[in-house]
């Protein structure tokens, strides 16, 4: 058997096993962290008490704009040098530990129901801040990503967040260009790489609005900044960013 054919069979078996596990242990039935069976009171957060305590909640001194960890002052060194186009970024967790597992289970393992749990944590955090928005939108995925995954993970999170918050969700952006993979790019090159990647999709719903832009993770913030620039060029009054992790 050729290596190519063998790898396809292994991949099929892995996927079949994951589908079986998802069917046997549906969303909310077992802890996503340790696999322990959950009592009904914990179904909404999908974690047992012990795993909830281990979540990497963002604490300590944070940049007042992008939310990055800092030691002194009010801005991180990047925001001190050049502010992003968005007004403020929020995230309940650092991108590590169980928070990273949530994201990877959704994006890499295709467990779409994870989006609802992520939205639940994001909503609880965002509502505790007393922040407001007129409309919610999501950072659109690339066509290549949609084809590979079969769903738009950011749209799922945004729609679930809208259900919980009562803030209307609208598709305000569309991706018009796919730039090269940013993994190997430095901080400033990432901003250049995403320039021109987005266009406004609904001018009327963006104008004069405070917009909450949803994504799963904020790294350099280059993509969020470019989206905010397009929304503000369309007349948005303010653009805040909310992600699950930072």
Image: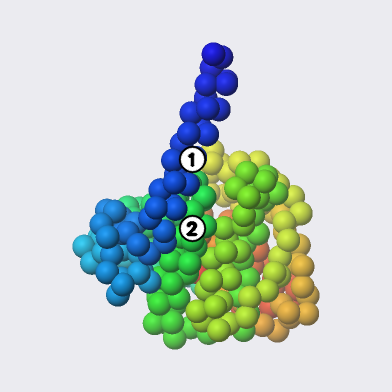
On the image, the x and y values in percent for residue 137 come to: 63, 71
Number of the label disc, if any, that sits on residue 225 = none
Q: Is residue 112 above or below residue 242?
A: above
Q: Nearer the viewer, residue 149 or 1?
A: 1
Q: Quadrant of the N terminus?
A: top right
* Element class at badge 2: strand
Q: Is residue 160 visible?
A: yes
Q: Which residue is mark 2?
A: 217
Horizontally, residue 30 falls left or right of residue 222, namely: left
Q: Is residue 52 visible?
A: no
Q: Quadrant of residue 172?
A: bottom right
Q: Quadrant of residue 198?
A: bottom right
Which numbered mark, 2 or 1, is in the foreground of this view? 1
Horizontally, residue 210 falls left or right of residue 112, namely: right
Q: Quadrant of residue 167?
A: bottom right
Mark 2 is surrounded, within 10 Å at the Cα level, by few (under 14), some (14 to 19) or many (20 or more) other residues, namely: many
Question: For the residues marked 2 and 1, what is the alpha-carbon distance in whole angstroms?
Answer: 28 Å
Name the residue at 25% across, 57% down. Answer: 36
Q: Which residue is mark 1?
A: 16
Say if mark 2 contacts mark 1, CB within 8 Å.
Answer: no
On the image, the x and y values in percent for residue 97 come to: 32, 52
Name the residue at 23% across, 67% down. Answer: 49
Mark 1 is surrounded, within 10 Å at the Cα level, by few (under 14), some (14 to 19) or many (20 or more) other residues, namely: few
Residue positioned most to the left: 50
* Element class at badge 1: helix
Horizontally, residue 216 falls left or right of residue 61, namely: right
Q: In terms of sequence position, does the residue under pointer 2 or pointer 1 come before the other?
A: 1
* Number of dots carrying numbers: 2
On the image, the x and y values in percent for residue 43 come to: 35, 69
On the image, the x and y values in percent for residue 58 come to: 34, 65
């Amino acid at each position: 058997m050729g290596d190519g054919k063998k790898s396809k069979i292994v991949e099929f078996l892995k996927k079949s096993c994951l589908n079986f596990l998802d069917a046997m242990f549906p969303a909310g039935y077992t802890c996503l962290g340790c696999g322990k069976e959950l009592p009904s009171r914990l179904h909404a957060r999908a974690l047992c008490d012990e795993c909830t305590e281990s979540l990497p909640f963002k604490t300590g001194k944070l940049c007042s704009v992008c939310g990055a960890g800092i030691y002194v002052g009010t801005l991180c060194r990047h925001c001190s040098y050049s502010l992003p186009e968005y007004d403020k970024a929020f995230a309940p967790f650092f991108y590590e530990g169980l928070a990273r597992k949530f994201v990877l289970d959704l994006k890499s393992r295709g467990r779409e129901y994870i989006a609802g749990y992520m939205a639940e944590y994001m909503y609880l955090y965002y509502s505790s801040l007393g922040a407001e928005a007129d409309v919610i939108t999501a950072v659109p995925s690339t066509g290549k990503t949609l084809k590979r995954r079969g769903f738009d993970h950011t749209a799922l999170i945004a729609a679930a967040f809208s259900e919980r918050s009562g803030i209307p969700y609208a598709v305000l952006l569309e991706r018009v260009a796919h730039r090269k993979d940013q993994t190997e790019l430095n901080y400033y090159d990432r901003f250049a790489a995403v320039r021109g990647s987005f266009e406004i999709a609904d001018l009327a719903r963006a104008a004069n609005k405070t917009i909450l832009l949803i994504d799963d993770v904020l790294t350099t913030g280059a993509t969020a900044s470019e989206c905010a620039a397009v929304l503000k060029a369309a007349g948005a009054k303010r653009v805040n960013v909310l992600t699950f992790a930072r």
